[in-house]
């Protein structure tokens, strides 16, 4: 496993040099977005998100946040299942020029193609490791749409340092998820003694 | 009833922030199975570090503090309303203290209730017994793994699964394969064979109260649990789907009677963050533990 440290704003050359299997520590800007936020980004195409997202990372996460005095703090902030954002993510990468999608479980062929075409990567964080990951959030810069969307669904603008991930889909079109799905499917057929669609 | 409410806040805090020791031990054993320097090994290291960090900080070990399932054992004839009230009040307080994420949304408007109360939540199940004290179990189950749970109706053509244990086995391995990339592995499979569609899901979920290393008193189910566990761990999905040797920590199966016309196999998937806590109340004594009564396997009725 190659270990890489990257910093936002991410440029295309850096992103295209990352390979499936690389261990990546991300620093800089990461904006949380999940189900309601993705629908909003694609349907409403808000302009206020553009400067935040260009060259940054989107994080599939609905955190537990706490207000201490007047500042927000991330208490618990692990990744949520990325597959649910598959219908939206290719559009989001294209329109907002996001360079990294951080989540868990990987995504499908449309996202993989968008990563290849526009120069983006999928970074896999460890699901459920929410306290350790929240400790990498050094500053909460802002929150958008909190009243309307609620705590889990709002856009939280995190500044992170050394956020640990593994590249599981890269800009060359490789996907660890597709590879493991195919391999485990063969093992399943072997255990059941028949071909399964 | 103020004391009861405080006890339930503490129970929720423990459930959300303190990973049960049997689960943590199973994750440590899983880490020893993986090769150092692999993504699987490092994922398990982060998971184990997180368990310690969450306990120290008294913070939710996973941000999705899930759906709450309560089982309350109480003397036959005791009043349930004050207990229900204390559970609901404790849920609001535990949310305010950040032990829980505001996690209940109106399905039509999308509005978050803000305090974890909702239509149908929390789910509380009362069990009358002939003892004097009370015993309470609570389970927190996140949405990522709940989305993986599924129900098969046998015979199942795609898998060539008939109405026998071989058919059940095919469903279970298929369910593990289909959960990759959604439920956080290594998880636990909770299974109900038989019942109707409703009791199947309820019984499958109850299995998550069972300790990782308990032994099923029905040797037929015990053998199936071991077989499915061993095959699932040879599918190569591994921790977080990174590839590796541990895809499941345990398989727990219960059998229910069924109608002649129906044969359901209900598969619940629980992510590695299998959060549960219990408390026994007897007079003024309050004893917290990780020993649930719910889901305890019954001896086979032969």
Image (cartoon, coloured by chain):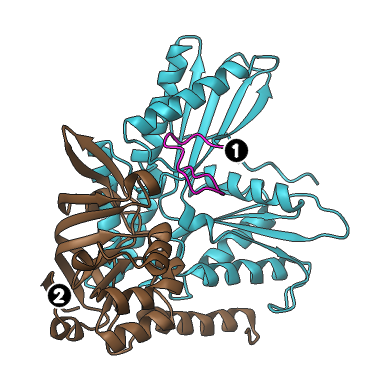
Chain colours: A brown, B cyan
Pinpoint residue A122: horizontal percent, then vertical percent: 30, 75
Snapshot quadrant of residue B160: bottom right
How far apart in space, not on screen, are marks 2 and 1 (Cα)? Answer: 45 Å
Pinpoint residue A41: horizontal percent, then vertical percent: 36, 65
Instruction: Decide: few, some or many residues near mark 1? Use Cα within 10 Å; few <14, some 14-19, many ≥20.
Output: few
**Is A7 displayed left or right of A65 in the figure?**
left
- Residue at 41 percent across and 32 percent down: it is B12
**Is A3 displayed left or right of A127 in the figure?**
left
- Residue at 47 percent across and 17 percent down: it is B4
Q: Is residue B98 above or below residue A21?
A: above
Let me know if residue B193 appears in the view: yes
Q: Main secondary structure of the magenta part?
A: loop
| Residue assigned mark 2 | A10
**Is A148 displayed left or right of A138 in the figure?**
right
Rendered image: mark on residue B120: 1
Q: Which segment did they paint magenta?
A: B104-118
Q: Chain of mark 1?
A: B
Seen from the viewer's position, the closer of residues B130 and B150 is B150
């Amino acid at each position: 496993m190659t270990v890489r440290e990257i910093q936002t704003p991410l440029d295309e050359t850096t992103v295209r040099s990352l390979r499936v299997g690389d261990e990546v520590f991300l620093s800089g800007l990461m904006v949380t977005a999940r189900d309601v936020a993705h629908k909003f980004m694609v349907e409403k195409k808000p302009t206020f998100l553009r400067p935040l997202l260009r060259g940054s990372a989107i994080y599939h996460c609905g955190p537990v946040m706490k207000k201490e005095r007047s500042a927000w703090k991330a208490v618990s902030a692990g990744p949520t299942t990325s597959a649910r954002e598959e219908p939206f993510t290719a559009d989001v990468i294209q329109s907002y020029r996001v360079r990294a999608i951080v989540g868990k479980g990987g995504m499908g062929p449309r996202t993989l193609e968008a990563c290849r075409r526009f120069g983006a990567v999928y970074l896999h964080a460890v699901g459920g490791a929410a306290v350790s990951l929240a400790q990498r959030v050094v500053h909460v810069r802002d929150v958008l749409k909190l009243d309307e969307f609620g705590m889990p669904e709002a856009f939280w603008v995190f500044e992170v340092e050394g956020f640990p991930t593994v590249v599981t889909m890269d800009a060359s079109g490789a996907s660890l998820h597709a590879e493991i799905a195919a391999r485990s499917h063969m093992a399943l057929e072997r255990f059941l003694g028949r071909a399964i669609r | 009833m103020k004391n009861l409410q405080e006890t339930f806040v503490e129970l929720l805090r423990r459930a959300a922030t303190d990973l049960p020791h049997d689960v943590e031990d199973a994750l440590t054993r899983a880490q020893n199975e993986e090769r150092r320097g692999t993504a699987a090994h490092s994922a398990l290291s982060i998971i184990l570090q997180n368990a310690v960090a969450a306990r120290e900080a008294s913070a939710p070990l996973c941000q999705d503090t899930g759906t709450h399932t309560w089982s309350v054992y109480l003397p036959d004839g005791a009043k349930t309303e004050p207990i229900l009230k204390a559970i609901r009040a404790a849920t609001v307080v535990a949310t305010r203290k950040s032990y829980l994420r505001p996690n209940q949304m109106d399905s039509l408007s999308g509005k978050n209730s803000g305090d974890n109360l909702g239509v149908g939540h929390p789910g509380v199940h009362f069990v009358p017994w002939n003892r004097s004290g009370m015993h309470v179990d609570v389970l927190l189950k996140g949405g990522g793994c709940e989305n993986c749970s599924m129900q098969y109706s046998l015979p199942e053509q795609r898998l060539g699964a008939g109405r026998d244990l071989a058919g059940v086995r095919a469903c279970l391995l298929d369910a593990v394969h289909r959960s990759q990339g959604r439920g956080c592995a290594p998880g636990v499979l909770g299974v109900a064979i038989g019942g109707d569609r409703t009791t199947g899901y309820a019984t499958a979920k109850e299995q998550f109260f069972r300790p990782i290393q308990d032994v099923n008193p029905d040797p037929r189910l015990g053998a199936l649990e071991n077989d499915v566990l061993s095959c699932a761990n040879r599918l190569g999905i591994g921790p977080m789907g990174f590839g590796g040797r541990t895809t499941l920590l345990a398989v727990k199966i219960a059998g229910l009677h069924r109608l002649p016309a129906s044969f359901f196999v209900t598969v619940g998937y629980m992510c590695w963050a299998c959060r549960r806590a219990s408390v026994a109340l007897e007079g003024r004594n309050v004893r917290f533990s990780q020993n649930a009564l719910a889901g305890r396997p019954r001896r086979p009725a032969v």
